[in-house]
Amino acid sequence: MLISGKTERDLWETCFLSKRELLDAIVTEVIVCRKCELWKTRKNPVPGEGSPNSQIMFIGEAPGYWEDVKGKPFVGAAGKFLDTLLSEAGLSRENVFIGNILKCRPPKNREPSPDEIEACTPYLNSQIRVIQPEFIVTLGNYSTAYIFSKVALPFNGITRVHGKFYKASILDMQVTIFPTFHPAAALYHPKYKEQLISDFHTLKQEPTQKRPV
Ligand code: URA
Ligand code: SF4
């Protein structure tokens, strides 16, 4: 069954599946995907992981070295810092969902190309549709640019837009978008580290009805 390239029959079948089963169906598609060239050089795809009932989705850029080795998102140095940020905000990996714009590692961690983003983001869109999060936290320029483009918000760089809440309609759902820096930026620049910590503090203060903390 295809979730991202839905037919009418697929849609009918999905009515009877749980959120977990729908997310697993997306993983199955990603594992066999050859829509761009990156499947040739990756070791493992990194579809993303977390709670199907999460009210917060974190979206990064693309798998790096360790993510490619382990098939899991944010398990390298940037991921360790993300774990710290999550715990500062009273969250854990178990009650959020963590994904990426690209599901396969670009060689030598080069930047994602526009073609790769176009080929891969239907999977992310499907994940957003299934989870229906209250908040989408975009980590860094690539994921913020992508999500802002989907909601027709002007994007003029992460340093200008980070740390604020943007209410928007995405894929026919109401969400609150919260852009911040990519955790990897903090590893090289102390000023981004401070701003990330401050942004996660802002995130923690935001009132929400459904947040599982
Ligand atoms: N950087 C990302 O953007 N995503 C990961 O999963 C790891 C590092
Ligand atoms: Fe498919 Fe995305 Fe991997 Fe490209 S990066 S092969 S589109 S899963």
Image (cartoon, helix red, strand yellow):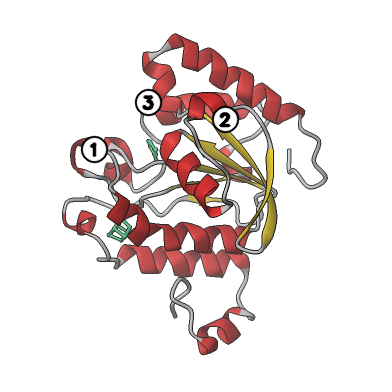
In depth, the one of 67 and 187 nearer the eye is: 187
Of label 2 and label 1, which has the lower sequence position?
1
Q: Determine contact: label 2, label 1, CB under 8 Å.
A: no
Front-most of residues 59 and 21: 59
Q: Is residue 88 visible?
A: no
Q: Nearer the viewer, mark 2 or mark 1?
A: 2
Disc 1 marks a residue whose amino acid type is Arg
Q: Earlier in the sequence, mark 3 or mark 2?
A: 3
Which residue is depicted at the point 30% across and 37% down? 66
For residue 199, side relative to residue 44 (left or right): right
CA separation, marks 3 and 1? 17 Å
Height in image: 27 above or below 179? below
Camera-nearest label, 3 or 1:
1
Report whether 156 appears left or right of 67. Answer: right
Q: Nearer the viewer, residue 145 or 44?
A: 145
- Amino acid type, mark 2: Val
Look at the picture and state if 104 lies above or below 186: below
User: Quarter for ligand 2?
Assistant: bottom left
Quarter of the figure with the N terminus? bottom left
Instruction: Check disc 3 and give the amino acid type.
Output: Ala
Q: Give the image location of residue 181, x and y in percent.
A: 49, 27
Q: Which residue in the structure is indicated by mark 3?
A: 77
Q: CA distance from mark 3 to mark 2?
A: 25 Å
Q: Quadrant of the C terminus?
A: top right
Instruction: Assign a secondary structure to mark 2.
Output: helix
Give the residue at x 48% y 11%. 191
* Disc with the residue nearer the chain's start (3 vs 1): 3
The residue where tag 1 is placed is 110
Left or right: residue 65 compared with residue 53? left
Q: Which residue is mark 2?
A: 161
Q: CA distance from mark 2 to mark 1?
A: 24 Å
